[in-house]
Image: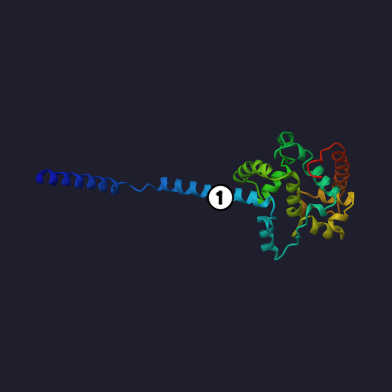
Amino acid sequence: MRLKSLMAKKAVKKKASGKSKKTSGRKFQPLRWLRRQALRLLTVLIALVLVLVLLYGGVNPPTTHTIWSEKQRLGSVDQEWIPIEEVAPVMLRSVVAAEDANFCGHWGFDVNAIKAAIEGGGARGGSTISQQVVKNVFLWQGRSYVRKALEAVLTPVTELFWSKRRILEIYLNVAEFDEGVFGIEAASRHYFGVGPDALSARQAALLASILPNPKKRSASRPSAAIQRKAGRVMDGAKTIGRDGRAACFE
């Protein structure tokens, strides 16, 4: 009986020793470890962005990468957040007419605008206001496949959780209108000396016409090309006001 007990104990020890050797014999695989870490990091980043998307549905973004980087470069920037209720309705219609006429009818991507951009060889952009908001608030400027891929993922998520009116409100508050001038409040006073609630149809059209390349354009000293564009924007703003394409944000 005692002999059997001793043999059983030896068998248990041998089995445990075998497991220990097997475990200690495993080789460290750096590629596998890196993949695991990358997956964990990606999961954390996705969760963080989703939290920010939900948060910014009701809380104003404190800054953006572009605003922060310009502040570091220039020393200061001019920006003051303003509720959409304090912006002249004609400004809302003008920026939609200039940048994204089908804003109320798409879910973040305007397929027709993308096709036109491709057919035009990239001479004109196909980005919607929703895409520009995602880029401005969550990502960075510049062209890269990584940024475009992230933009493509985040745009429909943003459309899902934010109203069109909220998307337009954030766009107007973070868009760059001149070097170091961000948002419609600063832009209105910078160019015309009035608040955004007092903008005329012509002033609103000029501000919308300098987007999305304001550093090379001026709303107060418009070139002939900008004046012509502003005329088209004024007509477009009237049209979308009449045909119901402004219903989602007014």
- Three-letter residue code for mark 1: Leu
In the image, 63: left or right of 84?
A: left
Residue 151: x and y in percent read: 64, 44
Residue shown at 69% from the left, 60% from the top: 70
The C terminus appears in which quarter of the rendering? top right
The mark tally for this picture is: 1
Residue shown at 16% from the left, 44% from the top: 8
In the image, 44: left or right of 147?
A: left
Residue 220: x and y in percent read: 86, 56
Height in image: 107 above or below 187? above
| Farthest residue, direction bottom | 75
Residue 103: x and y in percent read: 76, 40
Residue 97: x and y in percent read: 82, 42
Mark 1: few/some/many CA within 10 Å (<14, 14-19, 20+): few
| Farthest residue, direction front | 1
Q: Pointer 1: what residue? A: 45
In the image, 6: left or right of 141?
A: left
